[in-house]
Every structure is written in C-alpha cells, then in structure tokens.
Amino acid sequence: MKTPVLWLRRVWPPLVRDVGSRAIMAALIVACPPKVSLDPSSGSQKPQETPSATTSVTNARAETLLNPAPGQHDWPIYGGTPENDHYSDLAQINRSNVKQLTVAWSFDTQEEGGLQTSPLEVEGVLYGLTPSQKVFAVDATTGRLFWKFDSGVKGTQPDRGLVYWTDGKDKRILVGVMNYLYALEAATGAPIPTFGKNGRIDLREDLGRDPPKQSIYLTSPGVVYKDLIIVGGREPETLPAPPGDIRAYDVRSGKLRWSFHTIPHPGEFGYETWPKEAWKSSGAANNWAGMSVDVKRGIVYVPTGSAAMDFYGADRVGDDLFADCLLALNAETGERVWHFQEVRHDIWDRDLPAPPLLLTVKHEGKDVEAVAQTTKQGFVYLFDRSNGKPLFPMEYRKFPSSTVPGEVAADEQPVPTRPAPYARQRLSEDGLTTRTAQVHQWALEQFRKFRSEGQFVPFSVGKHTVIFPGFDGGAEWGGPAIDRETAILYVNANDVAWTGALAENTGENTARAVYLGQCGVCHGERMTGSPPSIPSLAGVGDRLRPQQLVATIKNGKGRMPGFPYLTDDQMFALVDYLTSGESKELPASGSSPPTVKYRFTGYKKFLDPDGYPAVAPPWGTLNAINLNTGDFVWKIPLGEYPELAAKGQGNTGTENYGGPIVTAGGLVFIGATNFDRKFRAFDKSTGELLWETSLPFSGNATPITYEVDGRQFVVIAAGGGKDPRSASGGVYVAFALPAKDGKPASAREHF
C-alpha cells in the first residue's frame, strides 16, 4: 500500500502537513482501487472482497474533508492527558441535556472475548483494539472503518489501550500485541519497518534472561516522553518470572535507550533490601497498570506490583524495593528521582493497580502540584510530585508477624491518615450478608472458620485469612478521574471479600506438583477456581482439545499469564493431569520451575451458595473525594444485579472494572459494572444519576470523550466477559446529542 501514500505526498504535500488524519485517510481511500483493502501485516495491496460501503468514497466528500470544520478537541492519550487525569473541558453535553444522549454510531469488531480498551481519538480518527488484539482506525464521527491491522499473533491477554506519537510530520500508533510492541503508520496501519525488526520489538528481550522462556505482555499501554516510548508489562504471579524492568525505547528506531531495574543489581540503590543473589532469579515487581508523565518536569511516575511469588517470600526476605512502589523516574535517563513503597515485603498481592494522576491541590494555602495514587486496599496516597513528600500525615503502623516457617513479614506498613479509605477495611460478623436468613446463617458459619483481622495479616497454613477489600480491590486498573476545577477525585471500587491460605509443598516431581506450583495459585488445589473471576477447570478436557490446552498454558488467556518456560514433558504431563486426573512422575533430568517451601492454595472469593457476595452491600461503589481537604463529597453504590433488582433488592452495587471520566459539563461518565450492562452519567457535584443506557455487553473499560466538527461524542468499549452467564463480544458505542439537522448521526452523509 506504499504507492498511494507516496503519490499523496507528492501531489498534495499541504494535505500531509496541515490537515487532520481523517482527511488523509479519506483521500487515501479515494487513491485506492475500490475493491482493495489495506493489508497492514505485509504492507502490500491485497485483493479482498469487502462491502463497498467500507472501501469506496466519493471525491466530493473527500474534498470536504480536506478542510475540516473548526471545533476539534482530541483524546490523544490513554487517560486523556499525560497527567492521566481522565478530565475533559468539553461541556456541550452537560447536566441540562445529558438525558437527550443517543447512539451516534457503533462499531462491532465481530469478535468475542471481551474488551478492556480505552480508545484514542486524534484529528477525527478513533483508534482501537479488537478482543484478539487487531488494531483498527475508524471515522470518529461515523464509526466507518479506515483500516485494520492483523499482526498474525493471536492476542489472548487484555489490551487496555494504545499510544499515539507525532513530531508534527511522522504520525505513529504504538501498540502492544502480546509480548510485542508494534509501530504502525497512523494513516494506513502499516508496520514501520525501521522500528525494531520489521516494525516490532520483542519485550522478552533486553531483560538479561533467556527470551523464549520469559512471560511478559503489554496489557496497558506505554507512555511517550519526547522521542521515547516507556513500557512495563504484565508478568506471572509465580516463579519463574522475568524481572519487572521499566524500559524506554527510541520511538523511531525501537532501540533500547534505558532500563530501570525494579529488582536492583549490585551497587544500585535498594539492592540491600533483597537477598544478595535475588536479582538473578527473583521476578516481577513490574508495572502492569500504566504510567503518567509530568512533561514540564520530565518525570515519569511508575506504579509497580508485588514480587513473585506473591504470597510467600522466604526467598526474598527484606523490604523488596522497588516492588509495590510509586516510582518517580527521570524520563530522559531512567534515573530515580524519588520513590514511595506502599507495601513492604508484599505477601498479599497488593499491586498498585492503576496509573497515578497528576493534579494541583490547595495545601496550607498554596497551590501544590501533586500526584495521587489509588490502591487495592482502598487508600488514596497524595504526594508533592516534585519530591514525594506526603501531603497528608502518614502513619507507619505495626502489623502481625508471620507464623509460617521461613517467612519474615515487615514490622510496619504505611497508612495514610487522610482521606479515609473508600473501601471497608475489616470484615466482622456484623458485615455479613442478610440477603436471606438462610444465606446469612451460611455466611456466619463459614466466616467463623476464617481469620479476619483487617489489613496486612500474613497468611497461615491450613486456615483461610480474609482479604477485605479483595485481591481485585478496592481500586482497579480503570483508574480514577480528577476534576481540575475542584480537585475532587472520582474513584470506583470493589467492596467484596476474598480469602486465601498456604500449604506446604511436597517436593514431588509430578504433574500434580507442576499444577499446584503454577496453576493452583489461581485455580486452587481441586481445580474449582473462584467463578466468575477465575473459572473452574473441572471437566476442562470436555471443553477443550489437548492442543487448545497447550496453547492456553503456553500463551495465557484473559487474566491468566502464559507459562512458556515449561518443558515439553511438563506441558504434556500437565495436560494429562488436567484432562484425566492422572499425576505422572516426571523425568529427573531437565529443568523444573523453581519451588518454594509453601504455596498459595488459590484465590477464593467469599460468595454465598447463590453466587452473590457473602458480605453486606454495597458490593461496588463510586466515590467523590476532595483532595484539597481529604474529605468525602459523596459515596454511592455502583451497579446492580438485574435479577435481584427485579425482586426489589436494587442499589446493591456490583464488582466493576474500568474507570470514570469527568467533564466541565458537570458530569461523571462510567460503565464498569459487570452484570447490568449499564453506562451511566452522574452529576459530579452530588452523585445524582442523570442518565443511563444499556450497552450490548458490559462496558468494562474507561470511556473517552472528544469533539469533531463542533459535536461532542462519548465512546465506550463494550465487551463483557466477566459474567459467565452472559455472552461476550467487542463493540464500540458512541453517544452524542441529536444532530442539529434533526437526523441521527448514523444517517448523516460523512462520505
């Protein structure tokens, strides 16, 4: 597809320099034969039978697009801005008219599997991802497809966003597809061959370990600073796991420019917080949640997660810097500016779950440029972003020690005194469900078998410990929004309990031992999982062929990472065990995954026999917190179970994934809820529900808003996938006020 692009630049150089991407794409379509579609994976013309509505365009409309009307306001960055504040100063859609919102267009990817993607919009073009990680560009006013890029690599992991970069002439989309980072031409979707190797870099490389055996996926987009793309990656919860290095690559060439070791090497700051040889074999302490950038200061703010193995740390005794940290790094060089460790020696999987947001607050009578970080525990940390000084008092509190041999839990953990937590901190009998008398009695009997003492209680052997809020928060990856006008933070939270325990490893070299060490962390000792979040593996052989199981184990799927380091013997024995229950002895030769003395027995969500949370509502909330003062402005339940609401048990809140956005029009938009498929708009001042609509699937993604040709749109990806009783898909839905000419947007002649 190179010839039409070069021809366009020769004949219409002002077009390439001075007009929007939507105009360029429309002109490209004119330049191409009507029945030829872009084949970005090869960069060539590929005859393909496609509907004429997708591949043809009139010259008259193309000429119109060469001179786009004023009224352009983009959403060019994941989170809206480098500060990741989820804020828009658009106000065409506002409190007074939000009830008039209607569907302007929708784009169906025609794939199943769910979506967590927050798309980008630049110069009238919307860029997004399909559930299998194909990349596409559509007209942001109509949803009409411009191009789609299929890398040939089937995506099985979440993919929450993309990166747009330009120097004014060169315009690129940088996007993760599994373990690869691609650079695509924004106008055509074609890979840029001078970036890395044939348009991509392999993130398994440059980590100091054997690349084919590493498990790393770019599930959240990187961030751009000048001519750098800075990335983290998702990694396993168990050993072996690659180190969680933060890496910056040249945005043009794909060459590595710097690495920051989150597991410090000898001589580096923090090395003494680990055993001496840990940097060679420990893993994770990774950034999977995304980052934020202070462009003026040249600082990138990087939240990290726990070290592997998540729940037993006898092989990593010490505070384990820079796991569970908010890192401030020099974006040009990767040098540490400051850090704050929110959990010392994490043995609870308390990763920092979302990018921090940058804002300005009033503190002691002065404007302070700050950084706010939400957590799974339900805390909001607020710091002076220049030096990491807490803006509210921080207490270092004593917590129980571990009773498990070899484990040394940290003596103290930091707890902010303000704001108050936005999720409950300790489960007692008074906090159990009363949905019916029977389920309350059941919950009471189960609860009395647990240990429930609040935050930072180490797991024990043989008895389950309550984690409340659960392993999925509190806050999650959707991230909060901040109102720049008021410094009010909006954060949605889960408020359900989970439990966990440890068991001693036997030291056997069997298929079952491989399962318990690698798979049992999530699916449990009896393969029962914790539906709906973690599926049961009982009868998996009836649902999947052995080849499908091997592919899933090797590459991962959904929240499950891949296990590429398993040998063929281990892989085949594991598949036999999953399908037949037979635990074969493995050959003594060959490498085995490292084992620790104790293992985690599996994530267990505390659900009643009917599948609802066994704690009292609310099970999910939306919170508004004034960060000038640390006071709550309002707090409401978010979401409902339709079948319970039909029985009069509404307003319970539900688990929710995907964040809010806030606008100058006085609105907070959010989807996120797992079970009711609703997309909602709230009054940002009061929390009053002003508008809601049903989506084709649950909107487990963060929406965006933008303006093209003077018209404001709000777009959310709806894919579902978190409710096993409902179908999943991949549809992008755009909402807007009715067109001024009285026609719905889908009927307007854009081409």
Image (spheres, rainbow, N blue to C red):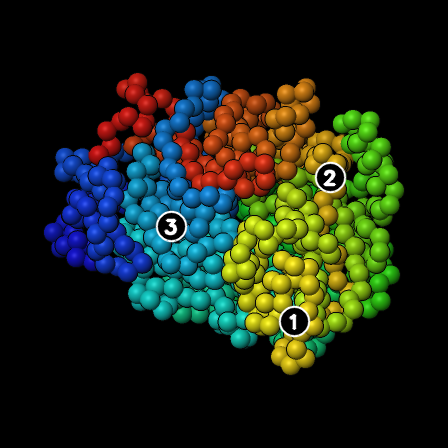
| Residue furthest out toward the left | 11
Q: Are marks 3 and 1 in contact (CB under 8 Å)?
A: no
Q: Nearer the viewer, mark 2 or mark 3?
A: 2
Query: Which residue bears the numbered disc 3?
Result: 135
**Dot 2 crowding, Cα within 10 Å, few <14, some 14–19, many 20+:** some
Whether residue 445 is visible here, answered yes or no, is yes
Q: Secondary structure at mark 1?
A: loop
Query: Which residue bears the numbered disc 1?
Result: 593
Q: Nearer the viewer, mark 3 or mark 1?
A: 1
| Residue furthest out toward the bottom | 589
Q: Is residue 270 above or below residue 128?
A: below
* Direction from residue 702 to residue 395 in the image, left or right: right
Q: Residue at x 66, y 62 (%)?
A: 577
Mark number for residue 607?
2
**Dot 1 crowding, Cα within 10 Å, few <14, some 14–19, many 20+:** some
Real-space Cα distance between discs 2 and 1? 33 Å
Quadrant in which residue 652 is drawn: top right
Position of residue 539 measured from the top left corner of the image (x, y, whole percent): 63, 51
Q: Which amino acid, by three-letter code, is at mark 3?
A: Val
Q: Secondary structure at mark 2?
A: loop
Q: Is residue 284 above or below residue 442?
A: below
**Dot 3 crowding, Cα within 10 Å, few <14, some 14–19, many 20+:** many
Q: Is residue 631 above or below residue 204?
A: above
